[in-house]
Image (tube, rainbow, N blue to C red):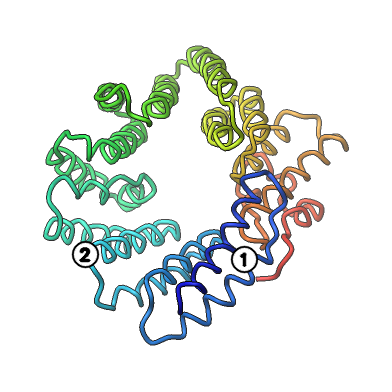
Amino acid sequence: MDQQSIQQIASYIQQYETQCQQGKQPDIRFLQIAQERIEAALQAESLESNVVHLAVKLHSICKEYEQALLLLRRYKQQALSREEEAWARWEIVDHLALLKRYEETVREQYTLIQWAEQHFPPEKRLWTVTDSTQAGCWFSIGKGDEWIYLFNRILEQTPIIPQTRQERYYALRTGTDIYLTRHNVHKAQAMIASIRELAQEDPQWDQQESVLNEVILLEIKVCAELQQMEDVRALAQQATIEFERQAQETKTVGQGVKKWTNFHNLGAIMYYLRQYDLAIVSLRRALALHSWAEQTYLWLAASLWATGKKQEKERQEVLSLLAQGTAFATGGKAWREFQELPEFQDVRDDPQFLQATQGVVSG
């Protein structure tokens, strides 16, 4: 496929994502056209890297993880550069994790780590263990201690230099979440302290503010693990004030879009802690700042449904939120994740809720 055709496909996907980022109802025709052209290109005997990357991105938007996995495995059979093979191997692990195929995820990730140790120096290996979804697969099959051993070994071998700062942050954040999952507050607090130190390595680092924001959220999780719910609520309210200050300082729409993630992430924690009133405040603010994460809509709908009187006005707002979330979730297909949430078990098979999450295309 010529470069102009590849750029055209990328443009269709970008136009779809831009509509999402602007909080608009995305036009799925952009994805449909892109998919038609990509499928034609994938018929070639040898796969082009640019086409594969676009195809995997498109499958990700549409939550078509199985199709992406098949393509990635086919692609990895080709002769690839070291960097391209690293990308393909990591994506295979990630898609297996998203499919909750735990045994396969663990095998592939262990193989990935061994391969990376043979092909990359210590400062370029940490990316193999920075994803919490992948890490969770080890714990799901009783191999959590093995993951922790590998994680700590690779982290300790990683030099503390500017080039590794971003990956070290991702690793420490994942480590904190994993230790909290295992109820090891002491280890989690040590990880948080390391993140604070990392954020101060360079006062001019453009990621410093977002990293310190994450520290605030992790400290809330620690308080929750310690059952200190008054502190959880106090810290959440302080975080809301700080995140709002940052949002108000934003001068352009482009920067403002980035600020919704603070409120989205805080709202997620409050939702899972069943602090619905605080979740509602944070998630509404995320939407006001143009969140295009489908989970923002889902968790806000669940929080409203859990706390409201479920009268017609509230019902219509919840249905509207689920419909909007569906528009962003799967490229126009049905999105029934609400059925998995405890707040919606009374309407799990309600025709109106099923209709709201039907999407606009079959498949």
Picture quadrant where residue 148 is located: top left
Is residue 177 visible in the rendered image? The answer is yes
**Residue lying at 28% horizontally and 39% vertically, measured from the top left:** 171
Can you tell which mark lies on residue 287?
none
Is mark 2 in CB contact (under 8 Å) with mark 1? no
**Residue lying at 62% horizontally and 22% vertically, measured from the top left:** 278
- The relative height of residue 299 versus residue 348 in the rendered view (above or below) is above
Amino acid type, mark 1 = Leu
Q: Is residue 49 left or right of residue 60?
A: left
Q: Is residue 262 left or right of residue 109?
A: right
Q: Give how far across and how far down residue 74 sits, in percent.
A: 36, 77
Per the image, label 2 sits on a secondary structure element best described as: helix
Amino acid type, mark 2 = Arg
Q: Give how far across and how far down residue 333 sits, in percent.
A: 66, 63
Disc 1 designates what residue?
Answer: 31
Per the image, label 1 sits on a secondary structure element best described as: helix
Report the quarter where the N terminus lies: bottom left
- The relative height of residue 260 versus residue 247 in the rendered view (above or below) is below
* CA–CA distance in space, label 2 to label 1: 30 Å
Can you tell which mark lies on residue 82?
2
Picture quadrant where residue 336 is located: bottom right
Q: Give how far across and how far down residue 255 sits, in percent.
A: 54, 34
Report the front residue among 112 and 7: 7
**Residue lying at 18% horizontally and 57% vertically, measured from the top left:** 116
Is residue 225 visible in the rendered image? The answer is no
- The relative height of residue 95 versus residue 121 in the rendered view (above or below) is below
How dense is the environment of label 2, judged by Cα within 10 Å: few (below 14), some, or many (20 and up)? few
2 or 1: tag closer to the N-terminus: 1
Picture quadrant where residue 276 is located: top right
Q: Give how far across and how far down residue 209 sits, in percent.
A: 41, 25
How dense is the environment of label 1, judged by Cα within 10 Å: few (below 14), some, or many (20 and up)? many
